[in-house]
Amino acid sequence: MKWIHPDQLLLICSRELASIALFLAQEGFLRSSRMIQDEE
């Protein structure tokens, strides 16, 4: 098992969190735009 540098681990974690946050933001945006269309 190779030792991962803490900075590298932090970079990987932040990248993962960023992609998850982006996905959730897109999902929320799509859902809210659908709700707005349904009201019209």
Image: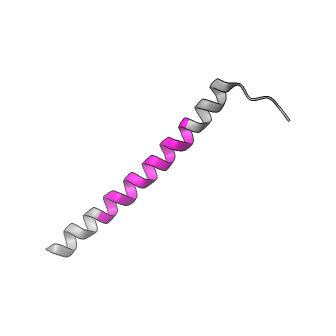
Residue 10, horizontal then vertical, whole percent: 60, 30
Residue at x 48%, y 42% (from the top left corner):
18
- Residue lying farthest to the right in this orientation: 1
Horizontal arrangement in the rendering, residue 6 relative to residue 2 (left or right): left
* Magenta run includes residue 39: no
Residue at x 38%, y 52% (from the top left corner):
25
Q: Quadrant of the C terminus?
A: bottom left
Q: Quadrant of residue 38?
A: bottom left
Horizontal arrangement in the rendering, residue 19 relative to residue 35 (left or right): right
Residue at x 32%, y 65% (from the top left corner):
31
Q: Quadrant of residue 11?
A: top right
Residue 26, horizontal then vertical, whole percent: 38, 55
Horizontal arrangement in the rendering, residue 17 relative to residue 3 (left or right): left
Q: Which residues are magenta?
A: 14-31
Vertical order, 16 against 8 (above or below): below
Q: Quadrant of the N terminus?
A: top right
* Magenta run includes residue 23: yes
Residue 23, horizontal then vertical, whole percent: 45, 53
Vertical order, 20 against 10 (above or below): below
Predominant SS along the magenta part: helix
Vertical order, 20 against 4 (above or below): below
Q: Quadrant of residue 36?
A: bottom left
Residue 29, horizontal then vertical, whole percent: 32, 57
